[in-house]
Image: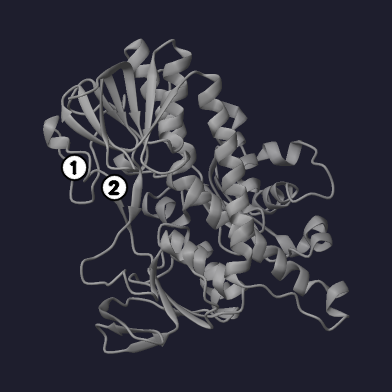
Amino acid sequence: MTQSTHFDAIVIGSGPGGEGAAMGLTKAGMNVAVIEKEHSIGGGCTHWGTIPSKALRQAVSRIIEINNNPLFRKSNSTLRSTFYDILSQAKSVSEKQTRLRQGFYDRNDCTLISGTARFIDSNTISVTKADSGTEYYSADKFVIATGSRPYQPDNVDFNHSRIYDSDSILELKDDPRHIIIYGAGVIGCEYASIFRGLGLKTDLVNTRDRLLAFLDNETSDALSYHFWNNGIVIRNGETYENIEGTDDGVILHLTSGKKLKADCLLFANGRTGNADQLNLEALGLTSNSRGLISVNDDYQTEVGHVYAVGDIIGYPSLASAAYNQGRFAAQAITRGQAQGHLIEDIPTGIYTIPEISSVGRTEQELTADKVPYEVGCASFKHLARAQIAGNDVGSLKILFHRETKAILGIHCFGERASEIIHIGQAVMEQKGEGNTIEYFTNTTFNYPTMAEAYRVAALNGLNRLF
């Protein structure tokens, strides 16, 4: 060891989880270093995941909105763009986010170290630099926030120029006419919306029997219908036998005997935790088959001075949750115990076109548990704001207890669903009499707004009671 620098705490990874931990630790007066293997901070969320994919989705959504607007249709012209063209907008947002977060580290005197971290022993790590040089650092505490990466099975050739995962798809420079998306989870469905919105022929291969089966059935059905109505071919209950890359495209061989051919293929079937390069064995730690690390309620691993947050620990694998997990881990380190915890009902935000968002329980769950509930619905096509904006596809559904009128679940399908859901979430999180569907009938909403859907849905539900 030619160099050794000691810190109170070292955070490995600068994504949302690492940032939350680093900011919490530095504000508590600790001497903190953050190690990031990429050329800039922000993690997968900023550079390959949440930010670029949502920026792409926003651009495509606006193109669709303009092309569907009667004012623009009169000119008989259609606004068109390619995936490569709109990537520049996504990259500019990532760059703005990187500069913003760089300022957080600078203002809080947090040391940033560039390179790939690997544990040497329980309190020492090596950092391999881009020029292959190695430096060594030690710390009293560690927070692992290395995130996750797209799952790549060994029998798929991801080095082929026409086979992509959800990270490398951002390097797509060709202008394909037809794409196959293998995997119809959140990422697969979001990219299906983006590519179909750009006019590509899109095949979505789903290994399950229905799209996003964790959603309320009506919401899942609405997404399936909307995809079908917009020309996306959904193939449920299919698994691949072989993925064959050719000079002019990709052939997907399915175990059912079907063959699909397209210009390129996006493999979006799961993710793996980034634990394999950490040499956890030097700590006496192991990760599971998915590359995930187990932690307790304080985000502490089986090795007492080592903590882990974010995608590397699994559910809920959300950027917003990871930031809070990092803050809670910092509290556990500095105060002996986390002062906060993630809420029980974490909202789901799925950025398809239209969006999907939900919080709380589904009708299927309530029925299985024999909870006496009722349903209140509001269709967006009946809302003045939706009519004005031309975003009249979608609806809001509120599930509430027939006797106590407590809100049990909220499910929204339509433009701005991920924003709309938080109004209901705020009411649902209130305790006692504050959480009832009658809140929405007794308050006054701005008019016209999308938020008014809550009043319409509440009245619809209450009218069902007898």
- Among numbered discs 2 and 1, the one appearing first in the sequence: 2
Amino acid on which the number 1 mark rests in the picture:
Ser
Q: Is residue 171 above or below residue 129?
A: below
Apparent side of residue 24 relative to residue 414 in the rendered image (left or right): left
Please report contact status of discs 2 and 1: CB closer than 8 Å, yes or no: yes
Residue 432 in the image: x percent, y percent?
A: 55, 27
Viewer-closest of 306 and 207: 306
Can you tell which quarter of the image residue 341 is in?
top left
Viewer-closest of 63 and 435: 63
User: Which residue matches tag 1?
Assistant: 287
User: Which residue matches tag 2?
Assistant: 273
Amino acid on which the number 2 mark rests in the picture:
Gly
Please report the residue visible at 40 percent of the width from the left and 84 percent of the height from the top: 249
Apparent side of residue 67 relative to residue 262 in the rendered image (left or right): right
Viewer-closest of 180 and 466: 180
Tag 1, which secondary structure? loop
Q: Is residue 426 above or below residue 385?
A: above
Q: Is residue 153 above or below residue 70?
A: above
Q: Is residue 48 above or below residue 107?
A: below
Residue 405 visible (yes or no): no
Q: Residues within 10 Å of mark 1 (few under 14, many from 20)?
A: some
Viewer-closest of 3 and 360: 3
Can you tell which quarter of the image residue 154 is in?
bottom left
Residue 340 in the image: x percent, y percent?
A: 43, 22
Please report the residue visible at 49 percent of the width from the left and 38 percent of the height from the top: 320
